[in-house]
Image: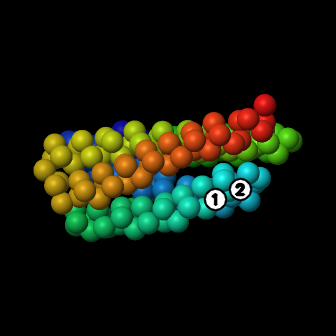
Amino acid sequence: MGLFTTPIKNLDDLFLHTLQDIYYAEKQITKALPMMIEKAQNPALKQGFTSHLHETEQQVTRLEQVFAALNQQPKGVTCEAIDGIIKEAKQVVSDVEDPAVRDVALATSAQAVEHYEIARYGSLVALANQLGHHQVVKLLQQTLEEEKAADRKLTQISESHVNKKAA
């Protein structure tokens, strides 16, 4: 058992822990996105980050609805993975002097975040289905689809704008 964590004894405990993990992650992402918006030079990338900040705020609200449907208080548990991804993004972005290359670094860092979220939400949907938490599957699936769309949008922006300019 980890330090200061609740023991995970069954699948319901694991589901709740994963829900708390992604809740923490989404809150951290809402804190990191303003820096990414500020640092981005490419208008499409800047707009993409701005849109995703608003979407992420809605996702936090949606997670709070999931907690309520499960008769749980919204609560996060420290997510070392998202903390590490965000820390690495900040370090890489601060090391890049060329604004065009910085945009590529921002986009690739954002995709690392999206891939983490896709993995977490995919697992949550599967677990919710398995556990019979059908009242929350739609909410989790909606966010999963938004994360996949954000990843596709980042790929499109990267391939059609930022990568070419940096090359």
- Rendered residue at 36%/64% (across/down): 62
- Determine the image quadrant of residue 52: bottom right
- Determine the image quadrant of residue 120: top left
Q: Position of residue 106 (x, y in %)?
A: 68, 44
- Rendered residue at 50%/43% (across/down): 151
Q: Is residue 25 visible?
A: yes
49 relative to 79 in the view: left or right: right
Which residue position holds label 1?
47
Which residue position holds label 2?
43
Q: Residue furthest right?
A: 97
Tell which of 146 and 6 is nearer to you: 146
| Image quadrant containing the C terminus | top right
27 relative to 66 in the view: left or right: right
Tell which of 8 and 127 is nearer to you: 127
- Determine the image quadrant of residue 118: top left
139 relative to 3 in the view: left or right: left
- Rendered residue at 86%/41% (across/down): 97
Under circle 2, the secondary element is: helix
Tag 2: amino acid = Pro
Q: Is residue 84 visible?
A: no
Determine contact: label 1, label 2, CB under 8 Å: yes
Mark 1 → mark 2, Cα distance in angstroms? 6 Å
Q: For label 1, count other residues whose C-alpha is less than 10 Å away and answer few (under 14), some (14-19) or many (20+).
A: few
